[in-house]
Amino acid sequence: MLTLKEITDLLKENGLYKEIIINGDWYYTVPENTANAEITDLSYDSRKISDGTLFFCKGLKFNPEYLASAIEKGATAAISELVYTDKLDQQAQSTPQIIVTDVQKSMAVIARHFYGCPDEKLELIGFTGTKGKTTSVYFTRHILAHEFGPVVGQFSSIDECVDGKNFIEAHLTTPESLDLFRMMREAVDNGMKYLAMEVSSQAYKKSRVYDLHFNIGVFLNISPDHISPVEHPTFDDYLWCKSQIIVNSDTVILNRDMDYYELLAQKAHELGKKLITFGSDESDADYRYHGKEHGYFDVSSHNDNLSAVNGEFRVMIPGHFNYSNALAAITVSAQLKDDPSDFAQGLKETRVPGRMEFLKNKAGLVACVDYAHNYLSLSESFKFMKHEYPDGRLIVVIGAAGGKAESRRKDVGRALSEYADVAILTSEDNFFEDPHHIDEAIKEHITNPNVKVIINVDRVAAIKQAFEMAKPGDAMFMAAKGREQFMHEKGQDIPYVGDYQLSQKLMEEYDK
């Protein structure tokens, strides 16, 4: 619980406060008869309001009607970047409106203190990168849980865990700050000591992790992605947002093989961060891996000032790119526990829902379900599929997100040109864009004339089509949706069966 005066004081300390408006009158100092009003809940959703709620007017397309609705339902006060006095009736104007320079940052600052600064009671580990964040978080949680028991929480784009054992489906790679700090509070109350989480570029762009400090921040890799009018206007903006994890971490772990390593290392050094590196055995990293076949890889240490990790490891998620993700998790774990003898078991036990999950049946059909959606992830996955199933065709069911990351369509077309035999272009998360337009854009970038291209925007029908044309020896690959049971369509989450769930059902049907 916080009072309105405590809230305005916090905003002033962080340079976010402008004024407070009550009944059309503007104040810098909160009036005495209002200062002690108690805030017992926080919300940015006008449908979730009760007496004592502080309501945040957030979003580029915020409608003042949401504020009027929140006040009608009992909101004690509201925070906004704009003055909405003229949009409210006389009675609603008596509800204090706190005007700030940035709603998203204000939301993060207030949420952190409202929930008792739970981040200070957790060993926070943040992962950023163009690809591999989810898998690295899973690897880390499994290793640490094997070492320390069920005291390790997780926030990922697939699911979230605040009690060390139960998981709930996630809808954002990094939750909004209100949800983030609320869940951290739950994690602390549930006895969690560690929390591994994904940190997206949008989390920094939209201040979801503003005022949040990591004990360990990991930068996995960087490549052009998420470049669009609604995400990042340029690659420079994308890289800068991701690099904020360096600014906000005590220990920084960088992939020595990544592009722009020198820039990021210089940033870490100048900011006085402890810098640790991991990479392949062709690099000069502190921790290095040597990839072998069937998920096996060796790790060696090359810095006497760090905990040593040496020996053979194995991951059960196919793909050479996962050796790097696994080593990132090992590097994190080595900073938290000197004895790495049980790390291998934690890695081997790691399973990631929707990540390179294979399904097979008696008829000899093979399907792989994965969340891959950019060139790096797709090309590595396709390469693995062609290696494992060299005698058949690679049949890919894929689309691209609507209204954002438009460069990804060229990347999808490039990956399909290099590896696919059949490309069934379909819907992914269309948002407000016509899926036919998205698929035609992908098709334009498929330059290999030997790739058979089919457009079927009904995703369920597209997957069924893949099964109908597949023969023993062929391999099907369902990209981007994994086990997600929703599709973003015109501002709503439309129920969807899920790629894995549908593929599993079809496998069983073909066995009958």
Image (cartoon, helix red, strand yellow):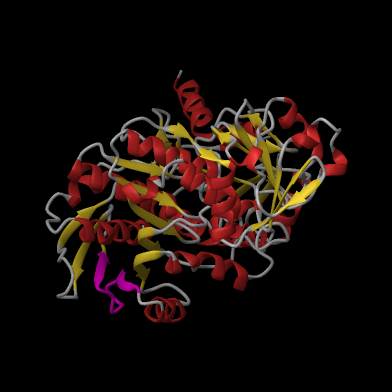
Q: Is residue 134 magenta?
A: no
Q: Is residue 286 magenta?
A: yes
The magenta stretch is: 273-290
Q: Residue at x 60, y 60 (%)?
A: 205
Task: Pinpoint residue 279: horizontal percent, then vertical percent.
Answer: 32, 70
Q: Which residue is drawn at 61% across and 69% down?
A: 237
In the figure, is residue 118 to the left or right of 495?
Answer: left
Q: Does residue 485 appear anywhere in the picture? A: yes
In this rendering, is residue 509 above or below 374? above
**Of residues 21 and 205, the one drawn nearer to the viewer in this rendering:** 21
In the figure, is residue 330 to the left or right of 104?
Answer: left
The count of marks equals 0
**Of residues 155 and 498, the one drawn nearer to the viewer in this rendering:** 155
Pick out the residue farthest to the front: 32
Task: Pinpoint residue 197: horizontal percent, then vertical percent.
Answer: 41, 49
In this rendering, is residue 329 above or below 44? below
Q: Residue at x 45, y 45 (%)?
A: 156
Q: Does residue 395 appear anywhere in the picture? A: no
In the figure, is residue 350 to the left or right of 380?
Answer: left
Task: Pinpoint residue 101: horizontal percent, then vertical percent.
Answer: 68, 58
**Of residues 311 and 25, the one drawn nearer to the viewer in this rendering:** 25
Query: In terms of image quadrants, where is residue 299?
Result: bottom left
Q: Residue at x 24, y 56 (%)?
A: 333
Pick out the residue farthest to the top: 512
User: What secondary structure do most residues of the magenta stretch adopt?
Assistant: strand
Task: Pinpoint residue 203: horizontal percent, then vertical percent.
Answer: 55, 55
**Of residues 300 and 328, the one drawn nearer to the viewer in this rendering:** 328
